[in-house]
Image (cartoon, grey):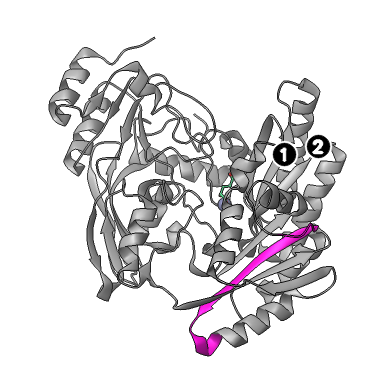
Amino acid sequence: MAALPAPLRQTLTELLGPGGLLLDESERLAYGYDNSRRQGLPLAVALPETAQQVQGIVRACRQHRLPIVARGRGTNTTGASVPGEDALVVSFERMDRILAIRPGDRVAVVQPGLLNGDLQAALAEHGLFWPPDPTSAAFSTVGGNLACNAGGPRAVKYGASRDNVLALRAVTGTGELVSLGAATTKGASGYDLARLLVGSEGTLALIVEASLKLTPRAPLWRALRALYTDVDAAAAAVARLMAQPVTPSMLEFMDGECVRLAREVGGAELPPCGALLMIEADGDQSVLDAAEAALRAAAEGPGCLEVSAAADEAAREKLWAARKALSPSLRTLAPGKINEDVVVPVSRLPELVAAVQAAARGHQLPIVCFGHAGNGNLHVNILYDPADAAQAARAEAALQAVFAAVVELGGQLSGEHGIGLVKRDLLARALPPATLALMRAIKAQFDPDGLLNPGKVLPP
Ligand SMILES: O=C(O)CC[C@@H](O)C(=O)O
Ligand SMILES: [Zn+2]
C-alpha cells in the first residue's frame, strides 16, 4: 500500500506540531468509516487548529497531488467522509470553538468542528437556536451539517442548513482562504457562493468558519399524535396539513412497522396502527390554541383513528427518543438495508407513498419508511439479505423503481443526507447533462486539480 511521501510527512509534521498528524494504522482506521458502513484507510490524518494550517495542508498536499477528505464526526450516511487509500483526512475536531454569539444580529460565528448539540446548548442561554437538528445532532458537527445540507424535523418550518447560513470562510483546492457571503440578513451582491458550498460535501472547499443565522426559540409548543389505518391515509393527511395556513414546527411520518419498532425497541407507548404522524406547533400562548385546532382539523379525515395531544414534556420526549432511534432499530430487521432519503413536493407525497408500496409488492421485499413528511422527505429503507443474490437484485430493482417515481414526481434523490459515494452514479443519471456540466465546471474552478473529496457527488 502507498505511504505518505516522506517530504510531505515532514512538512505536515512541522506545520501541525506534536500530535497534529496521525500515522498509526489503528488511529487512521478510526477516521476511515462513516455511517454508510463503508471503511477506508487514509494515509494520514491531519488535525489542524487554524485556518492557516488548513491552507498549509492543502498547499502541501497539492504539491504531491494527494487527495484530501474533510471530516467532522463521521455520521454521514452516504460514504461522503470515507477516504480512499491514497488520501489524507483533515479532521476538524480541534477547530470546535464558538467564536462569537451576537444575539442582536442573530448570528453565531463558529468553527466547523463544533458539535451541533454544543452550539444549541450555548444558544439556549440567549433564547436562540440554530434550526438544523439532524438525529445525530448530539455528535455531528456544524461543518458536517453544512457539508451535506443537513435538515431534520424542524426544517419544515425553519429550513435546512443552507437556509440558515450567512457567511463562510473556506479554503479552496488551491489553498486560498476565501470569504463568502456576509453576516447580514439580506444581500444582493453577486453570486451566492456561501450557500453554494452548503451541500457540496467537501468537494469545493474546506469550511474553516461559519456565520450562522439564528432564530429566537418559541416559548411554547403543542404536540399532537395522529394514528391512521394505513400509510395512504397518513400521506393524504400530510398533504392536507401542509395545504392549510398554519405551518407545523415539525411534521414526521412513521409507517406501521416503524410504529411497532418505536414501541418494541424504542419503548414508546403507542397502539398498533397502520401509520402515525407527529405534528407540532410552536409559538406563544396567543397563537397556539388556534394553531392546534387548525392542525387537528387537517389531521382528521378518512382513515384517521385518533388524534391526541402529548400529555406532558416527558411523553413528548419519549416519543421523540423512539423516533430518533428508528434508524439503528431498523438494522435489527434484516441483514441489509438500502437506506434512501428521497424528497418530493409535499403535495405529491401520497403518490410517492403509493409508489413505494407498489415497489415493495412488485419486488417482494419489505420497504419501511419514516421521515420528515412536512418537507415531502421520506427515509425509504429497502430490507434484504445481501448474501442472497436474488434478493440483492430485487432490492436494486425496487430502488430503481422508487427513484423513477421520485424523478417523475418532480423530486430529488436526496433531501438531507447528500450524495456521497453511494448515490453518485445515480445523481449523474438523474441530472440533465447541461446541469451536470455546470457542476463539473464549478468544481474545476474551486479545485482545479480535483483533490478535494474526489469521487464523491460527481463521478470521476
Ligand atoms: O438513517 C436514516 O435513514 C435517517 C437518519 C435521520 O436522518 C433521521 O431522520 O432519523
Ligand atoms: Zn432524517
Under tag 2, what secondary structure?
loop
The reply to whether the magenta stretch includes residue 41 is no
Q: Which residue sits furthest bottom?
A: 286
Please tell me whether residue 246 is drawn above or below residue 34 in the rendered image.
below
First reached walking from the N terminus: tag 2 or tag 1: 2
Tell whether label 1 touches label 2 (CB within 8 Å). Answer: yes
Q: Is residue 15 visible?
A: yes
- Residue type at mark 1? Ile
Q: Which residues are magenta?
A: 270-287
Marks 2/1: CA–CA distance: 7 Å
Q: Is residue 386 left or right of residue 215?
A: right
Under tag 1, what secondary structure?
strand
| Residue with the mark numbered 1 | 382
In-front residue for pair 330/410? 330
Image point 30% across, 17% down: which residue?
A: 24
Can you tell which quarter of the image residue 113 is in? top left
Q: Position of residue 345 (x, y in %)?
A: 66, 62
Cβ of mark 2 under 8 Å from ligand 1: the answer is no
Please tell me whether residue 408 is drawn above or below residue 158 in the rendered image.
above
Q: Is residue 190 visible?
A: no
| Residue with the mark numbered 2 | 365
